[in-house]
Image (cartoon, helix red, strand yellow):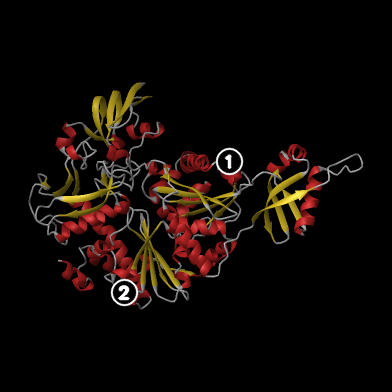
């Protein structure tokens, strides 16, 4: 066995032991050391670079590492094998994908206003924010030698009379502590019940004078990030809000790599443990502490996520999702309880899963579409959710069509050499001086934070600015020279956003021609999908009344820049709205409102799904969109004015 030491720029070393020939990335994964590997260790992305500081590694040079970098000690961890005692440096950019767990300051109006607006909009549509959880007070005569009725029957009969119910069931958790609690509270108690028609289920039992806490949890499980809100189910008040990186990401940045991983021996359990044990449960624990809520007081959970994430959460085989004819195990299910998954909530909490529409259009889109309210408007609206898969919904109160395009991980920092998720140290907004080519940027984390890399919104800004300043041409190639423009020995250009002495990095933060090409393909996928979907309905962009953009790729998207590079249609800026994490706000509505839950299912059932791969014009449209802004410049008349 050999000693392997992982060194970090801003934290303590981690030392473990590994066998000769063991893969360095696998050693890191087993040790819970965060090393970004969007390609799941296939040596395709080049993001898992580490620096050999001391010792031995068996590792070949790849196209992702120049000879100069190799001589300096840079290696890809996914193709490096242990050959002796070794020390490696894990740079910030390699571990930045793992978003630190954060609990939001609810004193900030920005943190809760999206949920307040969601509730207001849905209420105005005539949907009541009422669910089937409630608290009732039950007073019973204590047992005696003349009244020997068992405790469970005594409680059941009392609840039947009070609620005019025909069927009362007591959960196992309540039954276990029933005798103790009835006597402790002198048979004067409050019951947390779940009422459905004339059936009542008793979920919890507390004293008559205690303050009842009935909480619920809404969760958006993204491929990259997990966000959640803890909610008072009786009032709708948000008690805590938090987010964390999806622990599954070390098995690949996209759903296909994770599906492949879950097919390996023990893979399904590894991925389920990564999302539940490593991500959801610690996040729930943290939010409960913040809100002074006990975990067993969470009586309902609502999850909104894509079809693959739903399968991996439940430990269900996801392989059919990616294999023709693309049939998942389920679109909807109402049979899951928290205890089945080992969630840190009341074990009898019902787990609601927002319904999926297709293999690549999931519950996150149905929840997001519901929150956007396009289903309740006469105007023709386009809903766009930016992520590894770009999902689109177009329509109004009369019809809706959805589709998904493979945008790749570029919007979340994947396929970009300096790319990272929207977490501390990410450049999320940027402008460039046309004359000096010097950038000015905004960094997540606030004042004093040094840049680590670029997140999605920052990438949009940088490429737009490079094109506006004439630094790159429509193909994304560098056509100006200067201190900020570097070229390798093959003539390939790159633009330096921050020199290493000004960055939280061991080298310059720069965006390359390869990065730009990857992003052009991602934005081309979005725009071509919009065009093909509209054309299939005999519409064009002039008929779009409003565009709602969702996705957690930064604090906001500069819509003007997104249009300028040809990602979104060239329409009036007033038609754009950035609505943030609509998947989470939709899950919040489903959690609190039984009517909203039914309406989301109705929205999903009524939505037509368009399979782009079956559209003969899609590939031609995609190729035409892989320029800045497009091969047909007439589609973007405002660009001429901007330049």
Residue tagged by mark 1?
Answer: 294
Q: Is residue 572 above or below residue 430?
A: below
> How far from the left and from the top, in percent, is residue 493?
13, 50
Q: Is 547 on the left-hand or right-hand side of 642?
A: right
Q: How many marks?
A: 2
Q: How far apart are the alpha carbons under marks 2 and 1?
A: 50 Å
Where, quadrant-wise, is the N terminus in this rendering?
Answer: top left
Chain-order first, disc 2 or disc 1: 1
- Name the element at disc 2: helix
Q: Residues within 10 Å of mark 2 (few under 14, many from 20)?
A: some
Q: Is 350 on the left-hand or right-hand side of 273?
A: right
Task: Identify which residue, 425 or 349, lies in the foreground.
Answer: 425
Q: Residues within 10 Å of mark 1 (few under 14, many from 20)?
A: some
Res. 522 image quadrant: bottom left
Residue 44 seen by the camera: no
- Name the element at disc 1: loop
Q: Is 296 on the left-hand or right-hand side of 81?
A: right
Where, quadrant-wise, is the C terminus in this rendering?
Answer: bottom left
Q: Is 630 on the left-hand or right-hand side of 183?
A: left
Task: Identify which residue, 45 or 14, lies in the foreground.
Answer: 14
Residue shown at the point (34%, 35%) measured from the top left: 25
Residue tagged by mark 2?
Answer: 541
Res. 563 image quadrant: bottom left
Q: Is residue 120 above or below residue 534?
A: above
> How far from the left and from the top, in percent, is residue 206?
69, 43
Which disc is residue 95 wearing?
A: none
């Amino acid at each position: 066995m050999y000693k392997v030491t992982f060194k970090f720029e801003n934290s303590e070393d981690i030392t473990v032991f590994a066998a000769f020939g063991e893969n360095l990335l696998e050693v890191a994964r087993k040790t819970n050391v965060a090393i970004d590997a969007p390609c799941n260790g296939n040596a395709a992305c080049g993001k898992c670079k580490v620096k050999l500081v001391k010792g031995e590694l068996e590792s070949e040079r790849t196209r992702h590492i120049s000879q100069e970098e190799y001589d300096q000690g840079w290696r890809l961890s996914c193709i490096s094998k242990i050959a002796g005692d070794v020390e490696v440096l894990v740079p910030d950019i390699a571990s930045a994908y793992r978003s630190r767990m954060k609990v939001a300051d609810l004193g900030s109006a920005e943190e809760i206003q999206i949920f307040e607006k969601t509730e207001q909009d849905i209420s105005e549509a005539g949907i009541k924010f009422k669910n089937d959880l409630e608290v009732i007070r039950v007073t019973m005569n204590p047992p005696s030698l003349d009244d020997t009725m068992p405790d469970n029957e005594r409680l059941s009969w009392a609840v039947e009379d009070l609620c005019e119910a025909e069927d009362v069931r007591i959960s196992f958790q309540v039954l276990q502590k029933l005798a103790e609690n009835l006597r402790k509270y002198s048979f004067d108690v409050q019951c947390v019940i779940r009422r459905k028609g004339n059936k009542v289920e008793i979920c919890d039992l507390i004293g008559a004078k205690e303050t009842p806490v009935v909480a619920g949890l809404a969760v958006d499980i993204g491929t990259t990030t997990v966000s959640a809100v803890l909610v008072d189910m009786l009032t709708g008040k948000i008690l805590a809000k938090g987010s964390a990186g999806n622990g599954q990401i070390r098995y690949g940045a996209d759903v296909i790599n994770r599906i492949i991983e879950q097919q390996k021996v023990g893979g399904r359990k590894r991925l389920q443990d990564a999302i539940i044990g490593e991500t959801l449960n610690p996040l729930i624990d943290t939010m409960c502490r913040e809100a002074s809520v006990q975990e067993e007081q969470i009586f309902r959970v609502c999850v909104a996520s894509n079809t693959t994430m739903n399968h991996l959460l439940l430990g269900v085989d996801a392989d059919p999702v990616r294999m023709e004819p693309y049939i998942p195990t389920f679109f909807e299910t109402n049979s899951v309880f928290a205890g089945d998954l080992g969630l840190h909530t009341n074990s009898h909490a019902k787990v609601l899963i927002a319904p999926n529409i297709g293999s690549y259009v999931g519950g996150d889109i149905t929840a997001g579409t519901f929150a956007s309210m396009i289903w309740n408007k006469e105007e023709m609206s386009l809903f766009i959710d930016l992520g590894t898969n770009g999902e689109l919904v177009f329509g109004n109160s009369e019809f809706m069509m959805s589709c998904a395009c493979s945008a790749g991980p570029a919007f979340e920092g994947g396929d970009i050499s300096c790319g990272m998720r929207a977490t501390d140290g990410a450049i999320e907004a940027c402008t460039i001086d046309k004359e000096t080519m010097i950038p000015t940027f905004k960094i997540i984390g606030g004042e004093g934070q040094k840049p680590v890399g670029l997140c999605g919104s920052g990438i949009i800004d940088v490429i737009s600015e490079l094109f506006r300043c004439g630094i790159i041409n429509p193909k994304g190639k560098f056509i100006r020279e200067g201190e900020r423009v570097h070229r390798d020995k093959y003539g390939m250009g790159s633009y330096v956003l921050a020199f290493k002495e000004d960055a939280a990095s061991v080298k310059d933060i720069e965006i390359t021609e390869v990065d730009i090409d990857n992003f052009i393909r991602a934005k081309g996928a979005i725009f071509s999908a919009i065009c093909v979907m509209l054309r299939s309905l005999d519409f064009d962009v002039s008929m779009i009344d409003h565009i709602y953009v969702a996705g957690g790729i930064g604090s906001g998207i500069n819509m003007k820049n997104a249009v300028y590079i040809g990602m979104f249609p060239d329409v009036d800026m007033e038609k754009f709205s950035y609505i943030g994490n609509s998947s989470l706000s939709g899950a919040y509505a489903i959690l609190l409102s039984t009517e909203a839950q039914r309406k989301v299912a109705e929205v999903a059932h009524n939505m037509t799904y368009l399979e782009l791969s079956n559209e003969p014009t899609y590939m031609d449209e995609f190729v035409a969109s892989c320029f800045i802004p497009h091969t047909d410049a007439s589609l973007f008349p405002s660009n001429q004015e901007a330049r």
